[in-house]
Structures are given as C-alpha cells and as structure tokens.
C-alpha cells in the first residue's frame, strides 16, 4: 500500500513540477531516495506479511524506482531535448514539412502527389500542415527550456543547437507552405466546397438523429398501444 501511495505521490508531484527543469544530480538523488524507501517499505511488508512472495515486493519496488527515474528524466535538459526530438521526428515524416517552398511548382506537385486520392488536395494539405505547427512550437519550447539549463555540457549544447536548427527549418517550411497554399488560385474554390461538404454532413447527421428520434417515438407509441390492447383483452376475460 505504501508503494502504491508513493507512486501516486510521485506522479502528482511530477505533473505539478513539469514546468521546472531539474539537473541530473537531482534526478539521481531523488531516484536513490525512492529506491531506499521502496527497499525499506518492502522489508516491512515481507516481515509483516510472510504470505506475500518476496519477489513480488522486490519487483514492485524496482518498478516504482524505474518509474520515478522515467518521470524525473523527462524534466532534465536531456529529457526535454529527447521529447523535442521525438516531436520533430514525427513532424519531419510529413513530406511537405521537409520541402522548402521556394520552388512553388515543386511544392504543389508534391501536394497533388501526397493527396492524390483527395478530392480537395489543397484543403487537405492546409489542414494537415496547420495541425503540425503546434507540435513544432512545443518542440521549440522544450529545446529553449533545455538550453537554459544545460550549463557546461558541451555535447548536449551541440545537440540542442542542431535540434533548434531543425525545428526552425521545419517551422519555416510549414509556415511558408501554408501561405503559398492560401495564395493559390484554387484555394478559395476548394475551401467553399469544403465548407459545403461540412454543412451537408451536419445536415445529414441532424436528419439521421431526427429520424432516429421519430422512430423511437413511434416504437414507444406502438408499444403503448399494444399494452393497452393486451390490458383490454385480458381485462375482458
């Protein structure tokens, strides 16, 4: 029970402290303290509850310590940089995010290639690129937070600089691609068609819901009529 309470406390504390970076020394000290607490608590559990297999207690303590290390590592500069790189890797999978929009013809050729099966390729590309921007902003925020806490770690600083360059390049490609798509002559016609499709879908859903409601009312009325007939028939008998 104490181990479970400890895990809950660590999770809540980490979520509250997520805005405050920590150093590696804090990570190791905190993890060591949790490991010591788990060892002491495990010893008491084994002593008081001999029916519980020691392997279960030891395993629970090990998992708690590992979980603590994982949560706290995310708050270190290296952990924040790693999270940023995961976001950048996800963004870079999008072909348009990796393409400079300086060559307008190449950009729109890629749009039609990537969204070949879409009826409204410009709108699909625009919406997808727009969804990638918050991911890049989050990555930039994590990188800046990590950079502010690196101190004298030269290797980590170089990794941070490389990630920052990559994030700025992706952000530039995405933002310029969005601007070029909006300036395209077919953007507004496709946007109007997109809005009409959404309106049609909403109307269809509303009609389906109304039809379903009417069907339920009709079924309820039919059931009520059947009950009255049964009462009338059996009442007469």
Image (tube, rainbow, N blue to C red):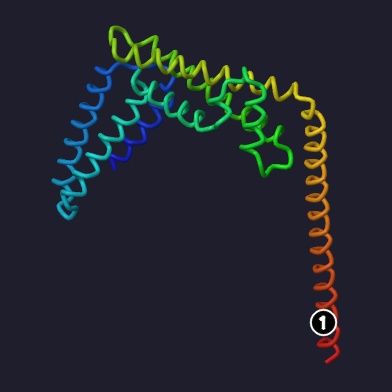
Among all residues in the image, which is located at the extreme top?
152
Point out the image quarter for the N terminus: top left
Residue drawn at 80 percent across, 73 percent down: 223
Answer few, some or many: residues within 10 Å of disc 1's Cα (few below 14, many 20 plus, some between 14 and 19): few
Point out the image quarter for the C terminus: bottom right
Of 157 and 110, the residue lying toward us:
110
- Horizontal side, residue 26 vs residue 80: left or right: left
- Horizontal side, residue 174 vs residue 196: left or right: left
Residue drawn at 78 percent across, 37 percent down: 194
Residue drawn at 80 percent across, 28 percent down: 188
- Can you give x and y, in whole percent of width and height, for residue 40 in the image? 17, 35
Residue at numbered disc 1: 231
Of 202 and 11, the residue lying toward us:
202
- Can you give x and y, in whole percent of width and height, for residue 59 in the image? 22, 45
- Can you give x and y, in whole percent of width and height, for residue 101 in the image? 62, 20
Of 119 and 39, the residue lying toward us:
119
Quadrant assignment, res 60: top left
- Can you give x and y, in whole percent of width and height, for residue 36 in the image? 18, 31
Quadrant assignment, res 127: top right
Q: Secondary structure at mark 1?
A: helix
- Horizontal side, residue 96 vs residue 211: left or right: left
Quadrant assignment, res 154: top left
């Amino acid at each position: 029970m104490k181990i479970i309470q400890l895990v809950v406390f660590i999770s809540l504390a980490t979520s509250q402290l997520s805005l405050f970076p920590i150093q590696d020394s804090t990570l190791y000290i905190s993890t060591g303290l949790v490991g010591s607490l788990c060892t002491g608590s495990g010893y008491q559990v084994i002593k008081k509850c001999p029916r519980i297999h020691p392997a279960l207690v030891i395993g629970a303590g090990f998992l708690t310590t590992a979980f603590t290390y994982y949560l706290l590592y995310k708050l270190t500069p290296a952990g924040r940089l790693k999270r940023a790189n995961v976001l950048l890797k996800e963004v870079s999978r999008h072909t348009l995010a990796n393409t400079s929009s300086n060559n307008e013809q190449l950009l729109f050729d890629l749009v039609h290639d990537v969204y070949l099966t879409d009826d409204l390729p410009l709108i699909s590309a625009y919406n997808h690129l727009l969804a990638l921007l918050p991911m890049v902003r989050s990555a930039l925020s994590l990188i800046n937070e990590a950079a502010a806490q690196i101190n004298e770690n030269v290797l980590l600083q170089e990794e941070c600089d490389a990630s920052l360059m990559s994030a700025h390049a992706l952000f530039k490609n995405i933002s310029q691609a969005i601007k070029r798509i909006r300036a395209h002559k077919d953007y507004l016609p496709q946007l109007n068609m997109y809005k009409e499709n959404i309106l049609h879908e909403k109307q269809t859903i509303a009609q389906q819901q109304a039809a379903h409601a009417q069907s339920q009312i009709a079924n309820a009325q039919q059931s009520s009529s059947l009950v009255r007939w049964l009462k009338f028939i059996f009442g007469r008998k």
